Image (cartoon, rainbow, N blue to C red):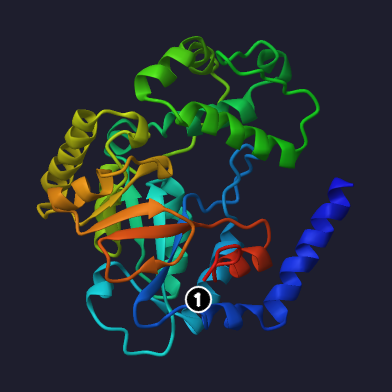
Amino acid sequence: MIASREVLKGFFFSTLRNFGYLKSKLKKINTKNEVLILNLHKVSNEVNPYWPPLKINYFNDLISYLKKETELVTFQDLKFENLTKKPRVIISFDDGYRDFFDCAMPILKKYKISVNQNIIPEAIETGLAPWNIRMYDFLFNAPENLLKNFKVHGWDLNFKNLNEKEKSKFGLKLSIYLKNRSKKERERLLQNSMKWINEFKGTTYSQMMDRNQLLEVYDLHEIGLHSYSHESMQFESTEYFQQDLEKCWSYYFNLFQFDPDIYAFPNGSYREGQPEMAVEQGYKFVLLVGDRVAESHSSILNRVTHYGESSAEAVVRGVGYGISI
């Protein structure tokens, strides 16, 4: 049943790709005042069903198509009028994983494309991925007998007979359960769980870029901030959020000797008034995840979550499939 569902899904996206859907969707984007911002995270052929990355060849096919059919731009380009008849698209990465440097950048160089990469300063400095990614890495690497005893307070974990698709859904649900809380509350719930994760020595963890790699990225792409330590700001105090804006600003300035322009809310989580606070702090582009086309002249911009389990799906989702335009 699962296999036949995957076959039908592949056929569906291949049909959309080959029979006019892509251009018809792109035509709906207003070239004068709209921009489609695609939000990506990892590009890699590594396997982790709890949080699957976009495969390298799928990313290549996405960039190849967008290069031909759209105007691939950066946030700085939004200050200028679009003189082409093509819709504008921005590729916006979050977190700062090492695979961006190793896997995505060679493809971007081949097509002469600049993108946005929003980093987590704490992750750059410690080399540790955000807590939820480390948890996904643990779940993928830990043996079944260990997972049977793995507990998260308030969550009924059942790892028995999960197929690849179910693991992806499970990882997402568990992450949402824990993300929708303050740092203090989440750490309380994960207090015992993190001991299991940290004590198990068989996990291969997702790698982050280091400072030297980040400086190379800076020469070619736009660097933004993705909060200092990747907390859900909706559940943090105003004081906490203000301090985060300031810490991010200082980190960026000390590293690059320029003021930052971009702040991307982690986990798509924010409270009313917080995006405006970021603008008042001096950030010119404040990024949300609203899964809709953004107004290109606004300082507060929505992004569209991008993923794909095939080349066809990656390309179809790259023109805004699933959102209203």
Asked if 291 appears above or below 180 in the picture, the reply is: below
The image quarter containing residue 216 is bottom left
Q: Residues within 10 Å of mark 1 (few under 14, many from 20)?
A: some
Asked if 216 appears above or below 72 in the picture, the reply is: above
**Residue 250 in picture, x, y percent from top left:** 13, 41
Residue under the point 66% across and 64% down = 313
| 97 left or right, relative to 318 | left
Residue under the point 60% across and 56% down = 55
Asked if 208 appears above or below 199 in the picture, the reply is: below
Residue under the point 27% across and 48% down = 275
**Residue 281 in picture, x, y percent from top left:** 14, 48
**Residue 65 in picture, x, y percent from top left:** 55, 77
For the residue pair 214 and 123, the one nearer the viewer reads as 123
| 196 left or right, relative to 9 | left
Q: Amino acid at mark 1?
A: Leu
**Residue 280 in picture, x, y percent from top left:** 14, 50
The image quarter containing residue 56 is bottom right
**Judging from the image, what secondary structure is the residue with disc 1 in?**
helix
Residue 217 shows in the view: yes
Which residue is the site of mark 1? 66
For the residue pair 191 and 201, the one nearer the viewer reads as 191
Residue under the point 37% across and 25% down = 182
The image quarter containing residue 247 is top left
